Image (cartoon, helix red, strand yellow):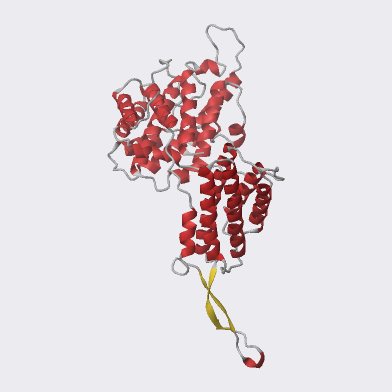
Amino acid sequence: MTYGQSSSELRRILTDLLAMRYPYYAIGGPHPHRRENVDPEAVQFRADHVQRYRAVLWRYLVDLTRAAANDRPKQEPPRRMLRWLEAGGPSIETLPGARLADPWEMGTRRDTPFVELWRQAACTAFTARERDLTIVIDRLLAPQKIVVLKDVADFATAIVQLDDRCSRFPGWRHLGRSTTGASSRAHPSRPRTTGRVVGLLANVRNCARWADARIEPSGYEIDLRGAHPRPMLTPRPHPDGVEGAIAALRNAALYLTAGAPSASVLRTLVRLHGEISVTASQLAGAAGDIRFARAFADRSERYRQLFDELINLAGTLGTGPQVLDEVHVGMERMNGVSQLSTAQLERLSAVFRFTDDRVSWAVHRGVAKHLYFAPAGTQLGTVPGPGGIRRCVPRHVAVTKDVHPRILVLATDLRPEVAAPEPSRSHVRSRLRFAELVNGSSNAVQRSRAQASSLALSTS
């Protein structure tokens, strides 16, 4: 899950929570206009769960703020917000049972929508913190840190507002202080203005305004960071026809991701893909698609040139048998195809681009790991033969960028030109809507809208 996906999911959940104006009744508390049997133990049980879920979410926000604000001067709003988040958040000692939510509580669906939404928020924050956080915060750029700080400030503002609405929960402990909450009923959309919550909310909103005035378009690239799911292998046996060929070739490219193949496997792989490209070019020409026919013919020529450079390459270490097995199946399926549709040509071209990228990566990886060796004349053997005479034996040297550099040049030429991914516009739009929800109509929101318009990220 990328940062953009996890933050958008948190915004969706907090928006749904803010839409529940009377959460005390939602967890089973007595309603003044309904006669229902109230179970105090069940109400206490749900309130305890909400507090533990809130603590998991708050810890994630603190960790994000530390990563984005630690290099800022102490007097700037990000560092002040960090101090208030650390001091005003729930500590483990003050939580019900003196613990965070356990795996059973995180994985079990709750019986009320309000508590279930808090569970979903906690699960999203826990997953993002444990699996994605180290990738997200690795070498953060300054514009990306600004976006993270703005997100944290909006999230914290929403949680403070929800904290006020939960004042009637039994045993509820408010943010910003350690005493049990028993304050009078407040307006549903206005946070409490008592205790240390005043300072917490003021510093959070001050940081939001500070970050909003400094957001740059490049900062939204933070949404692309995080753990991306690995593609799965297509189960065998593969069907006949081009669909089976595409599945087999895709599996072969995925096997290359595990590591560089041995020299003999790499040489055979390159030769087979050159032959498959010739077949694909002929099928595209028969279908009347000149664009794909030329592209596949060019691909076969690039693989032929690379094969000529690999003909004398040596090296026994590396992966291989599974790769060749899948490529042979793909070639067999391609030889049985008589015609291709435009959609099939598109899918075949996509798997070719994926394979080219993996082959290029495997060659560079093998060279970097010194798995491949090129012939360099002869030398005297180390073991004497009959009569004590040492024979001349072939001499090999490791392939590097200086030794046999053309291999790396041809491998680089295989790599397809792929446009850099762009941040999702939906994530930016969700930020604008959420900022308006938690902060109301303010100058900061109007500036955010103006920035979005200048970035061609319209809300329509």
Number of numbered discs overlaid on the protein picture: 0
Q: Is residue 383 above or below residue 326?
A: below
| Front position in the image: 243 or 19 | 243
Which image quarter: residue 214?
Answer: top left
Q: Residue furthest bottom?
A: 387
Question: Where's residue 218, x and y in %?
Answer: 35, 39
Q: Using the rendered image of the protein, determine whether residue 167 is visible from the camera's viewpoint.
A: no
Left or right for 399, reference 220: right
Closer to the camera, 423 or 390? 390
Q: Which residue is most to the left?
A: 75
The reply to whether residue 70 is visible in this rendering is yes
x, y percent for residue 231: 58, 44
Q: Is residue 460 left or right of residue 272?
A: left
Which of the 4 image quarters holds residue 116?
A: top right
- The residue sitting at 49% across, 18% down in the picture is 20
Q: Position of residue 278 (x, y in %)?
A: 58, 52
The answer to whether 441 is drawn above or below residue 407 in the figure is above
- Near-viewer residue (364 or 450): 364
Residue 365 screen position, x and y as percent = 51, 59
Residue at 52% across / 43% down in the picture? 290
Q: Residue at x 59, y 49 (%)?
A: 254
Q: Quadrant of the C terminus?
A: top left
With respect to residue 288, does 162 lie above or below?
Answer: above
